[in-house]
């Protein structure tokens, strides 16, 4: 069967689990009703299914092609992009002043999930644009906004992020691209950037690069980095396109996956005079501006993980329902059973569904926190900003680990058919494997969580999340069904592990054992993701069972089953992870590097 | 840095950890000394490094090509194959009566590890030949042996296994290829086989296919399957090649990885008269014959997992030592630290090394058990046969899961460089991803372990393994160093979980809860692999530290560190796995299939 947009599940997770319903009932988006949310999601689901999903396999086979500084996207790409603009999908959460609809980030997040289910190598282009829009909107001068923002919001142009250089990946302090002040107040940019997603393409007339570079007199390290807007074509005062800027695509990467998304090496100032750039924000304060777009992009990459997991799950579930092999003890039909009857296949499919749902609930909760932070004020706004900051690395790393794991399980469900490229199962793994790497590797996310987010407000952000999770768990435990009591008990255990490890990490950090905290960061992030995700699944299951009409519907029964299996299998890992974090980090961090050489 | 054959580590694991030293000192291979083993491994390491490793990336890029029924292997393949024959590598464990050297399976296993570190898409060809040799040697008539065996043993010809058909993958009962009796005592084969590794190629003059097919009057199901030898070219009485047989390669698969290994669709009898086949063993008893070759192949596929893991580990360790980013708290040098100094990277590298070593120790222990079963007699032979039967599914599935996990971690260590194909890190994952699928999916291995191997002798095989592991753990615990005491304690806990779960599964099986046992099979196999592997690492560490001269050598310190970190991190999972098996299997197995549809 072909891909189906899981609109009902997405709407339910968004409203009931992640709490967009509360955001709406509190009037934070006065013009938006739940019905309108449903209608938009319905339409987005249609667009994902009809316009994007058919591109996925063909885009993978054809790939984007490079020659002579130009990038040709696969057949169908330009058409789909035009339809995307016509549908208004580009403008969803953009600022109204520049043609945007100013809808919730959470609603935008749900559509990003859908686009990535359908075709992640297409969907990554608008993700970068969104980040650029946000950074320009927050930090650029009014003049730059007037000239660039509307065309970016409406998707007439696309935006990119230019951070990485060969010697500067995770460590931006090492970057060398230089900017010189010109007499007219603009700048000239010289240098090379690598891994620039959609750095060059044939979808739009112009491309707006946001580029990190150093001024000649800049301090060393990250405090000497400035952010510049460098358009492919200069833009005249009247908005028309002017001269070609000295920005060139030198080539594209041959990658494991996401073949249709061109990953470009960009040269700035190759002709000698420098590429014309415009400062965004203040000199030497570029990193702060860039972080604006990175947080947005990190959540969106997490949603890529959710999206590909959903697609892999659908393909595996369909295959398991059709493919017959052997006879399961439970199968009453004639001949061989569909493999979905085999307990080991059930285990894989339930894992896939539970992991996907768990990751989705965390990513959406992060998006709702962003909306609350933006729409509320004072203490409330600060509270939700802290929540969004806390959840962003978890939403990015846990969801993308899930993307890889679910895609790999999807191959396994397909057996030999999963290894041949025709079925598509292999593409999901190839595509998903970059998500734990780009926009900050998952190791960087874990370090961010442990070294920056846990200490916020002396641990207040984590403490308040734990308190909320405990409230959820108590509610699950108190729901009037025996299976929920068991789930609630397990949630409370896992939350206990999360709390213990948070305290242990705080102690390690403040007690001069920073390296131990760093060694425990990745398992801690996994622990947090499993716990938060399990709570999301359980809250959804209880809500589904809560209404009499739904109580025994297929959907309600499925949610209860998935929450239960997750609590009894994956969630058991929190105990081991806690032992690993508190027991294993010392030996890892103390390991002499000479023993790690090959 | 380029690949280096880890000959010392392999020799140590083989002799000291897996126990080949005992096999030799007991005189089971009277002509073989430890020195000779070392010399052979040294030479194999050289061959792997010089002749095979350089083929790996190029073979992946070029792939094998199909046209008009012919398969062209990549440039260099035919040369390497000739050198392989000249080096005598083909004959290592083959029967002396037919040109083999009759060396231990364990020594053969160590070389298979090396070949797969260097180039798995080359190494898979002899793996299939080995299986064919073993099946022919054990079950074919003297006439067939005389005509075919020597050329297979010496590698002049290669052998294949033809099991799978589109409707018959894991379930061989469903196969339809038919065999008709001819008047001259031979048979005529008609049908299609898929996924035939090296079913056609240009390396040898002849290819000997072992084909499962059904006679017209055969009983339904697996009791009606016969095994046939079907040569590409018929062989005259004098051994010269005769007419082309009606066996055709119809095409090769476009796969995620192992591009150089042609995965063929084979047609038998396309011209109408049938392909000439010769019965191996008795009519309708083909499955038993095939299992002879499948067990051999399963261990070898496990070794493919070990091999690719080793290669991925080396690449990641090298990259981490050279690539600089950021500053680790522990780094005393100037500027950015090599990333190996970062605790999160240490964690990944230690995981990779520990998982690889753990898997290697299990696979080699399985091979040593096979040797003992073959060389000993009476009760001893039966004991070791049972041990080999028990360890085979673990060696296959755990090691191949490790192969995928380590290859994926290797990509992560490389960051963005891991996702571009030039570095090779991505190839390791693409290549490794088939190992958990072919030669019986890992789910099938887990079912084999739980439903067939655990019940053997009323649980005696598992009980005796557990007793041995416990003896190992006690020895580790008693070794006179505090870190070994801690490791020994953790081993004993894990062994307790293995014992508890074995008992629980036996009860589920015998108590009419077969589906629950099946649902717990995969996590149980993982539990067994982690426990056995951790014991292997710890035994090696203790042995290394035991000799005064070695006590503080780099190697001894590294082994102690790796054993400790594994015990404190990965081994913690046994507790969660035990909860998952005993607590989660009921819900999974009872899950109504309608809730698993997409």
Image (spheres, coloured by chain):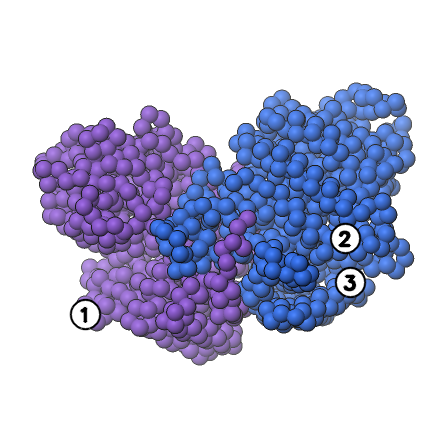
Chain colours: A blue, B purple
For the residues labelled 3 and 2, the Cα–Cα distance comes to: 20 Å
Q: Residue at x 40, y 36 (%)?
A: B253
Circle 1 residue: B378
Answer with left or right where residue A388 lies relative to residue B491: right
**Residue at image mark 2:** A20
Residues behind callouts 3 and 2 on a single chain: yes
Residue B574 lies, in percent from the top left, at 50, 68
Q: How far separated are the C-alphas under marks 1 and 2?
A: 71 Å
Seen from the viewer's position, the closer of residues A181 and B147 is B147
Cβ–Cβ below 8 Å for labels 1 and 2? no
Q: Looking at the image, tell me whether mark 3 or mark 2 is earlier in sequence order.
A: 2
- Judged by depth in the image, the label closer to the viewer, 1 or 2, is 2
Q: Residues within 10 Å of mark 3 (few under 14, many from 20)?
A: many
Residue A441 location in percent, x, y? 64, 49
Q: Chain of mark 2?
A: A
Disc 3 marks which residue?
Answer: A461
Q: Residue at x 85, y 34 (%)?
A: A98
Residue count near mark 2 (Cα–Cα under 10 Å), binned few <14, some 14–19, many ≥20: many
Q: Quadrant of residue B520?
A: bottom left
Q: Secondary structure at mark 2?
A: helix
Q: Secondary structure at mark 1?
A: helix
- Whether residues under marks 3 and 2 lie with C-beta atoms below 8 angstroms apart, the answer is no
Residue A330 lies left or right of residue A473; in this view the side is left
Q: Residue B260 at x, y = what percent?
A: 39, 37
| Residue A489 horizontal side relative to residue A182, left or right | left
Foreground tag (3 vs 2): 2
């Amino acid at each position: 069967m072909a891909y189906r947009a899981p609109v009902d599940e997405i709407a339910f997770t968004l409203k009931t689990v992640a709490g967009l319903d509360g955001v709406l009932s509190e009037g934070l988006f006065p013009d938006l009703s739940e019905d309108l949310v449903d209608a938009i999601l319905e339409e987005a689901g249609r667009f994902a299914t009809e316009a994007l999903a058919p591109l996925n396999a063909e885009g993978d086979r054809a790939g984007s092609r490079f020659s002579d500084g130009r990038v040709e996207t696969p057949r169908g790409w330009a058409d789909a992009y035009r339809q995307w603009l016509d549908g208004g999908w580009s403008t969803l959460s953009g600022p109204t002043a520049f043609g945007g609809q100013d809808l919730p980030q959470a609603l935008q997040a749900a559509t990003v999930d859908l686009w990535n289910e359908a075709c992640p190598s297409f969907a990554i282009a608008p993700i970068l644009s969104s980040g650029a829009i946000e950074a320009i909107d927050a930090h650029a001068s009014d003049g730059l906004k007037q000239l660039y923002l509307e065309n970016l919001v409406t998707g007439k142009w696309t935006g990119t992020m230019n951070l990485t250089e060969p010697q500067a990946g995770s460590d931006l302090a090492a970057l060398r691209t230089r900017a010189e002040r010109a007499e007219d107040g603009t700048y000239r940019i010289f240098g090379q950037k690598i891994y620039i997603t959609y750095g060059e393409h044939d979808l739009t007339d112009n491309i707006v690069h946001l580029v990190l570079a150093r001024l000649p007199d800049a301090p060393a390290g990250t405090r000497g980095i400035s952010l510049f807007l460098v358009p492919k074509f200069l833009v005249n005062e009247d908005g028309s396109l002017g001269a070609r800027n000295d920005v060139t695509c030198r080539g594209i990467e041959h990658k494991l996956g996401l073949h249709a998304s061109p990953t470009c090496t960009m040269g700035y100032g190759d002709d000698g005079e420098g590429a014309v750039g415009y400062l965004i924000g203040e000199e030497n304060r570029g990193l702060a501006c860039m972080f604006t777009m990175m947080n947005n992009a990190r959540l969106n990459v997490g949603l890529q993980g959710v999206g590909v997991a959903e697609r892999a799950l659908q393909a595996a579930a369909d295959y398991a329902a059709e493919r017959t092999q052997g006879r399961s003890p439970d199968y009453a039909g004639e001949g061989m059973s569909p493999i979905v009857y085999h307990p080991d296949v059930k285990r894989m499919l339930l894992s896939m569904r539970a992991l996907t749902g768990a990751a989705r609930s965390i990513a959406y909760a992060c998006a709702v926190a962003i909306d609350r932070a933006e729409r509320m004020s004072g203490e409330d706004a600060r509270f939700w900003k802290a929540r969004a900051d806390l959840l962003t690395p978890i939403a990015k790393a846990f969801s993308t680990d899930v993307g890889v794991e679910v895609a790999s399980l999807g191959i396994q469900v397909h057996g030999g058919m999963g290894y041949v490229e025709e079925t598509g199962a292999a593409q999901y793994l190839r595509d998903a494997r970059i998500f734990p790497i780009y926009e900050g590797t998952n190791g960087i996310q874990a370090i961010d969580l442990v070294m920056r987010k846990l200490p916020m407000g002396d641990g207040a952000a984590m403490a308040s999340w734990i308190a909320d999770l405990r409230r959820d768990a108590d509610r699950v435990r108190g729901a009037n069904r025996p299976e929920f009591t068991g789930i609630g008990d397990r949630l409370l255990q896992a939350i206990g592990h999360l709390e213990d490890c948070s305290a242990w990490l705080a102690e390690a950090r403040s007690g001069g054992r920073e390296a131990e905290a760093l060694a425990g960061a990745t398992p801690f992030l996994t622990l947090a993701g499993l716990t938060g995700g399990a709570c999301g699944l359980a809250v959804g299951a209880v809500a589904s069972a809560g209404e009499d009409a739904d109580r025994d519907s297929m959907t309600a029964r499925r949610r209860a089953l998935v929450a239960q299996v997750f609590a009894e299998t994956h969630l058991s890992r929190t105990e081991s992870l806690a032992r690993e974090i508190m027991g294993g980090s010392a030996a890892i961090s103390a390991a002499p590097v000479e023993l790690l050489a090959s």
